Image (cartoon, grey):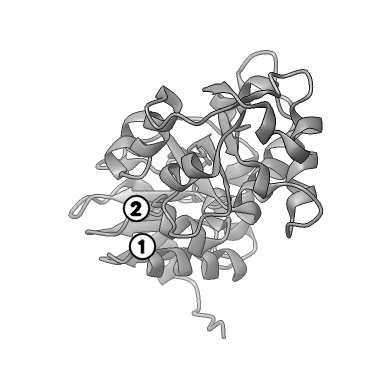
């Protein structure tokens, strides 16, 4: 990064007191290199982080994280699951202000973040770290949400974590009970209906994957199971297509041939429940 007083413009008020005169311009900067690794699944899996792009997705994620309750004194927020505050937001001056759709919304949210998490960058840098041809000049790096997978009344009472690969009834479970289980399979079973889940088998196109996740979020689906060679739902293209639903739904990868206990419980419960068609 280097000093660039002439590039401040309307960015000055936002960065006042947090190195407002520094604008990141170097493509060799370590932050730039790190964000680029999140373009690939390998980098996302290694870091446990994902890249959000554009005003709507970034703003929705910021609002959800800022509205989340503070972590308890016995466990950090990350251990309790849910969306975390971003570790990095990279934004150019062109993304802010009242002349940009949602620019004021973004600026007001960025003011609530720690100064160390927000980096003012040049438009050229944003073009490099974004995956779209015409980026909206704002990206954010967040931890992949660790949302609890609802258990079933006939199952083990355990919950897997979103995004985990389940190979047996003992793997991918944290052995906790709580409101998430009650909100999912336990309450659904008491109500006499089979919980609604989306099973994706071999959905290889990221755009289609994102569309399915978005539709699932809009129709009351309580979790998503990926079977076979599915596209990564945290692929940047899939995240954009899902319009934020990926960050709210538990998603589980099930290796072909495995039959974890929760799956057997679901199958048994659904077979004993009258089918209800949903249009």
Q: Position of residue 236 (x, y in %)?
A: 43, 52
Q: Residue at x 37, y 38 (%)?
A: 36
Asked if the residue at tag 1 contacts the one at tag 2, i.e. Cβ–Cβ closer than 8 Å, the answer is yes
User: Who's the residue at 40% across and 43% down the image?
Assistant: 163
For label 2, the residue is 232
Residue 66 versus residue 40 in the image, above or below: above
Image location of residue 2, percent across then percent down: 54, 21
**Horizontal and vertical percent position of residue 94:** 66, 48
Q: Nearer the viewer, residue 150 or 194?
A: 150
Q: Quadrant of residue 20?
A: top right
93 sits to left or right of 45: right
Please name the residue that numbered disc 1 is placed on: 206
Pick the front one: 35 or 22: 22
Residue 74 position in % (x across, y down): 64, 14
In the rendered image, the vertical position of residue 78 relative to residue 141, given as above or below: above
Q: Where, by quadrant of the figure, is residue 76 drawn? A: top right
Which circle's residue, 2 or 1, is located before the other in the chain?
A: 1
């Amino acid at each position: 990064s280097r000093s660039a007083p002439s590039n401040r413009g309307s960015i000055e008020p936002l960065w006042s007191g947090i190195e407002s005169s520094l604008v990141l311009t170097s493509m060799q900067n370590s932050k730039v290199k790190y964000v680029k690794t999140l373009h690939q699944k390998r980098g996302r899996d290694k870091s446990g982080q994902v890249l959000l792009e554009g005003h709507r997705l970034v703003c929705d994620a910021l609002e959800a994280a800022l509205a989340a309750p503070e972590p308890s004194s016995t466990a950090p927020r990350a251990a309790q699951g849910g969306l975390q505050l971003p570790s990095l937001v990279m934004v150019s001056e062109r993304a802010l202000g009242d002349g940009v759709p949602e620019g004021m919304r973004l600026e007001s949210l960025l003011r609530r973040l720690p100064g160390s998490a927000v980096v003012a960058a040049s438009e050229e840098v944003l073009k490099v770290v974004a995956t779209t041809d015409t980026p909206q000049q704002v990206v954010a790096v967040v931890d992949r949400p660790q949302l609890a997978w609802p258990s079933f009344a006939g199952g083990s009472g355990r919950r897997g974590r979103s995004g985990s690969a389940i190979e047996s009834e003992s793997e991918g479970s944290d052995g906790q009970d709580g409101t998430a289980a009650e909100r999912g399979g336990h309450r659904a079973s008491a109500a006499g209906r089979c919980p609604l889940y989306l099973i994706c088998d071999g959905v290889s196109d990221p755009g289609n994957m994102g569309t399915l996740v978005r539709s699932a979020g809009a129709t009351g689906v309580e979790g998503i199971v990926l079977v076979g060679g599915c596209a990564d739902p945290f692929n940047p293209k899939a995240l954009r297509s899902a319009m934020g639903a990926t960050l709210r739904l538990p998603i589980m990868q099930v290796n072909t041939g495995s039959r974890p206990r929760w799956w057997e419980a679901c199958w048994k419960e659904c077979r004993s429940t009258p089918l209800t068609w949903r249009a």
